[in-house]
């Protein structure tokens, strides 16, 4: 019996040794090729379903022998000791616990080499309750799965979690595992079902402000494996915030028009939108306004049925340009009221209940049925207004840290709502859970079914706050819950998908350039660990103002705005 065990042990050792020797030969022969690898396209072997394991070699010059690919990867797997604590490899994308929508294209899977000395990396995906695996061998530190592989991964992570492990491999003296990283993720059966229109802008703001021709708007279909198309670029003037009507028939956008900072485009949706002067209004046409105040019409929103657009007017904006590339402006409104425009008769009106000059009223958003307007409100601080009027802010050192400015010039907003009442307005009321909490509450966004409001909260201020976090409350008020989707640095400018199941938002989690994340929200208002929308990133631009549109991606192909 003992002799049989010894013989069996010797056979195992010989098999492992032979596998390692064959692997070392195969790997060392391919290392010269791996040095040239620049992308994740390569040789792969798998079925149309996970009836067998998937093996992929990131080697575009390989002879395509699936047996060799399988042999190399399985030999590496044979030396992995799951009971051993290997040095940690940091998987930076996806995040641990990420929930992907069923209709999203493959992400950029990325990890960091913590001086492990790895020559190769094996990415291995396993599935709960299944024996089949997906395996990818590369010399780089990233992998964007091809369409077939990613669709298989999503399909097999619908009913349970998938575990993504990354192993560092050294081949100098046999095969050695030098490090390991691991995250889990799952796929939701809920689709996104709509594209996102977002703006890309260079940094810092002072540079961007003088180069409007570098701004561009892209329409992202998250299910597409192609880069999102640019639908608007090389603007002759500055543009900014955009929004859609709930039914996707009307689009609106801030635009400087013939030197008028209060210009605004309101146009019917179409594959090609050629903006003419007839499509442009000016918030400065509001009757009864103080002519000494230049109206910008901040934070405009088109109503759900496209019959109105509402914005902040008669504003006093507190603005300081900063040299910090990540937070290159300090901005909030020290005064302002809400006004709406009616395209049907081309008239402007103040909204009663949100037009009190003793308060600053801003950041409006329409309820799903257009019956209410939620907004941010704070008492007017005349000392802050005087600083704006006297242009004293021009003397502030542009190297002043944002944290110091937040302490020096504090303002805190509460969320209110007012009935729209067909333009007649009404009595404003604070929204419980987003008011009187000793914090600044802003950017309310109603869910498409009217059940929830997601808003931002920070210690002070209104926009570009490093400590801003997203919270969710019942639309009529209640206990505010912090979203688990929040990243560590700035969470802001969020938008609901038309089906109400996904929320896109902006963050500076990865550096000075703002990136976009997507999280799931269920019927009970519970959210998920977010997806980094890595396919939308651009190293030289910030991704800003993400807005879902209730349209098909092909319904908007080009917006043309010429210099009039």
Image: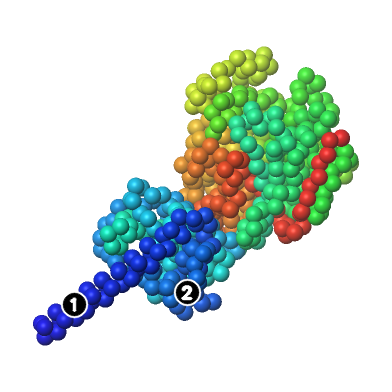
Report the residue at 21% width, 79% height from top: 11
Which residue is farthest left? 2
Secondary structure beneath label 2: loop
Count of residue discs: 2
Counting residues from the start of the chain, the first of labels 2 and 1 encountered is 1
Residue 70, position as x, y percentages in the image = 41, 73
Circle 1 packing at 10 Å, graded few (<14), some (14-19), many (20+), is few
What coloring was used for the rendering? rainbow
**Which of the 4 quarters of the picture holds residue 164?**
bottom left
Q: Is residue 101 left or right of residue 98?
A: right
Of 493 and 399, nearer the camera is 399
The answer, for residue 73, to whether it is visible in the render is yes
Residue 549, position as x, y percentages in the image = 70, 53
Report the residue at 81% width, 41% height from top: 561
> In the image, which disc is placed on residue 10?
1
126 is higher (above) or lower (below) than 479: below
> In the image, which disc is placed on residue 65?
2
Report the residue at 55% width, 64% height from top: 146
Of 420 and 237, nearer the camera is 237
Of 222 and 476, nearer the camera is 222
Residue 545, position as x, y percentages in the image = 65, 43
Residue 365, position as x, y percentages in the image = 68, 43
306 is higher (above) or lower (below) than 466: below
The quadrant of the rendering that contains the C terminus is: top right
Report the residue at 43% width, 67% height from top: 135
State how far apart marks 2 and 1 are (Cα). 30 Å
Of 28 and 283, nearer the camera is 28
Q: Is residue 504 left or right of residue 283?
A: left
């Amino acid at each position: 019996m003992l002799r049989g065990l010894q013989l069996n042990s010797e056979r195992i050792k010989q098999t492992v040794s032979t596998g390692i020797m064959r692997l070392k030969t195969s790997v060392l022969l391919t290392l010269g090729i791996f040095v040239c690898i620049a992308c994740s396209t390569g040789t792969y072997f798998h079925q149309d379903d996970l009836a067998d394991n998937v093996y992929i070699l990131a080697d575009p010059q390989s002879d395509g022998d699936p047996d060799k690919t399988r042999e190399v990867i399985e030999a590496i797997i044979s030396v992995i000791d799951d009971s051993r604590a290997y040095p940690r490899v940091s998987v930076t994308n996806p995040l641990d616990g990420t929930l992907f929508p069923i209709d999203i294209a493959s992400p950029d899977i990325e990890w960091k080499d913590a001086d492990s000395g790895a020559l190769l990396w094996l990415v291995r995906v396993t599935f709960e309750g299944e024996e089949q695996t997906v395996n990818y061998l590369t010399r780089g530190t990233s992998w964007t799965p091809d369409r077939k592989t990613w669709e298989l991964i999503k399909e097999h992570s619908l009913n349970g979690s998938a575990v993504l492990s990354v192993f560092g491999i050294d081949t100098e003296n046999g095969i050695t595992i030098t490090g390991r990283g691991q995250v889990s993720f799952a796929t939701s059966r809920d689709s996104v079902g709509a594209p996102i229109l977002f703006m890309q802008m260079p940094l810092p703001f002072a540079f961007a402000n003088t180069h409007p021709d570098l701004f561009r708007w892209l329409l992202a279909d998250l299910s597409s494996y192609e880069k999102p198309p640019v639908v608007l670029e090389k603007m002759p003037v500055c543009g900014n915030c955009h929004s859609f009507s709930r039914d996707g028939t009307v689009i609106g956008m801030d635009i400087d028009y013939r030197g008028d900072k209060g210009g605004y485009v309101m146009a019917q949706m179409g594959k090609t939108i050629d903006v003419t002067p007839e499509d442009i209004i000016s918030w400065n046409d509001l009757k009864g306004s103080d002519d000494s105040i230049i109206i910008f019409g901040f934070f405009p929103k088109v109503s759900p049925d496209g019959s109105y657009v509402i914005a902040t007017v008669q504003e006093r904006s507190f603005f300081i340009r900063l040299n910090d590339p990540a937070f290159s402006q300090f901005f909030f409104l020290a005064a302002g009221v809400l006004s709406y425009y009616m395209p049907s008769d081309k008239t402007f009106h103040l909204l009663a209940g949100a037009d009190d000059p003793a308060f600053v009223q801003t950041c409006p958003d329409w309820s799903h049925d257009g019956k209410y307007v939620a907004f941010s409100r704070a008492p007017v601080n005349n000392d802050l207004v005087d600083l704006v009027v006297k242009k004293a802010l021009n003397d502030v050192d542009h190297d002043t840290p944002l944290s110091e400015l937040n302490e020096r010039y504090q303002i805190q907003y509460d969320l209110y709502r007012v009935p729209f009442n067909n333009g007649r307005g009404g009595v404003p009321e604070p929204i419980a859970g987003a008011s009187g909490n000793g914090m600044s509450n802003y950017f309310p966004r109603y869910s498409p079914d009217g059940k929830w409001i997601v808003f931002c909260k920070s210690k002070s201020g209104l926009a570009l706050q490093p400590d801003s976090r997203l919270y969710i409350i019942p639309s009529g008020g209640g206990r505010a819950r912090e979203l688990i989707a929040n990243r560590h640095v700035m969470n802001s400018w969020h938008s609901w998908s038309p089906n109400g199941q996904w929320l896109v938002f902006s963050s500076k989690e990865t550096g000075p350039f703002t990136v976009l994340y997507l999280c799931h929200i269920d019927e009970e208002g519970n959210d998920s660990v977010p997806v980094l929308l890595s396919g939308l990133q651009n190293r030289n631009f910030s991704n800003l103002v993400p807005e879902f549109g209730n349209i098909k991606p092909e319904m908007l192909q080009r917006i043309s705005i010429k210099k009039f």
